[in-house]
Amino acid sequence: MKFESLSVELLYILIKVADLKSINKSSEVLSLTQPAISKKIIQLENYYGTQLFIRSPQGMELTVAGKKFYTNAKRILNDFHDLRTSVLDKSISMQELSIGVLDSISSFLYPQFFIDILSKLREITITNKVYELIMPFNNDVLDAVLMDSAFRSDLNGDFFEKKLFEEPYFVVYSKENTQVTNLTGPKVTAKELQKLDVIMYPKYCPIHQRIISTYQETNLEPPKITEIDYSESMVSLVIGSPFVSILPKSLAVNKVTHNIHNLAMKQLDITFLRSVSLFAKTPEILEVVGSKLESYNQN
């Protein structure tokens, strides 16, 4: 195998197979035959002289060497996207942009993206107060913001939106909390949540606002909410108490896995869905930031 035959396509195929853990699923997404994908993976393994995947009936798993290769391949593809963007639109670069983002998005959904661009941006605002994104965006201080899609109604003037993903909300609770453990349904309903003791960030928190607005939309009385302004205190209060908290899946998984012996989580019903969008002042900014985010797309 010659060096010239190492292409962006090969790297993209490896990343897709690693993400989906399946040649069959990757075949459908990439519009390539399964033998063609297998051949290209073998090409990479032969070139580097090491096994990148462990093949089993359960799927395709990266080896230790494969995980290192995967990380570097994603970085190379990201640089390629930067190059492509600079060629397509020479008037805009990340260095010229001021971006704002909710902390729950930067920390738990796109951590590597923000690590990589932190020093490249002209300015970045990371906050858990949504008004600290909306006001600067409306006043043309921020060029783009990542936040819950529902807050588009608070934006003024011309802007452009790209929906990034949706995720469910979960009730996080103590394993000793019988108020939740006695609920037999697969998900917690809005009416069941009304009867629980809920603890959340204050009303400036987009999650708090979204829960309240969802109850208003369904003409139901929201549950009683106790407000607290510090996340670690919230977790401590939930452990071993009747309090529960409501968190989007990405944040709930993080909190529960770090307290696996004390905490559990249960999904809220379909009424409660979090949608996250990228908002930008111009289509060009939306394309530049959006294409970069795509290379860090969540699985």
Image (cartoon, rainbow, N blue to C red):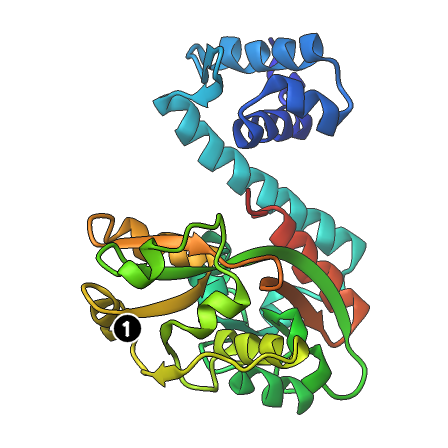
Which of these two is toward me, 256 or 61?
256
Residue 297: tell me if it is visible.
yes
Is residue 115 shown left or right of residue 216? left
Residue 91: tell me if it is visible.
no
Question: Vertically, is 233 above or below 20?
Answer: below
- Which picture quadrant has residue 20? top right
Residue located at (47% from left, 66% from top): 192
Residue located at (35% from left, 59% from top): 180
The x, y position of residue 150, in whole percent, is: 66, 74
Is residue 220 shown left or right of residue 181? right
Which of these two is toward me, 13 or 166?
166
Number of callouts: 1
* Other residues around mark 1 within 10 Å, as few (<14) / some (14–19) / many (≥20): some
Which of these two is toward me, 88 or 163?
163
Question: Vertically, is 229 above or below 74?
Answer: below
Label 1 belongs to which residue? 234
Residue type of the residue flagged with mark 1: Met
Residue located at (60% from left, 70% from top): 148
The x, y position of residue 54, in whole percent, is: 43, 14
The x, y position of residue 217, in whole percent, is: 67, 78
Residue located at (26% from left, 61% from top): 177
Mark 1 secondary-structure assignment:
helix
- Which picture quadrant has residue 181? bottom left
Q: Quadrant of the N terminus?
A: top right
Question: Vertically, is 65 above or below 72?
Answer: above
Q: Quadrant of the C terminus?
A: top right
The x, y position of residue 200, in whole percent, is: 38, 77
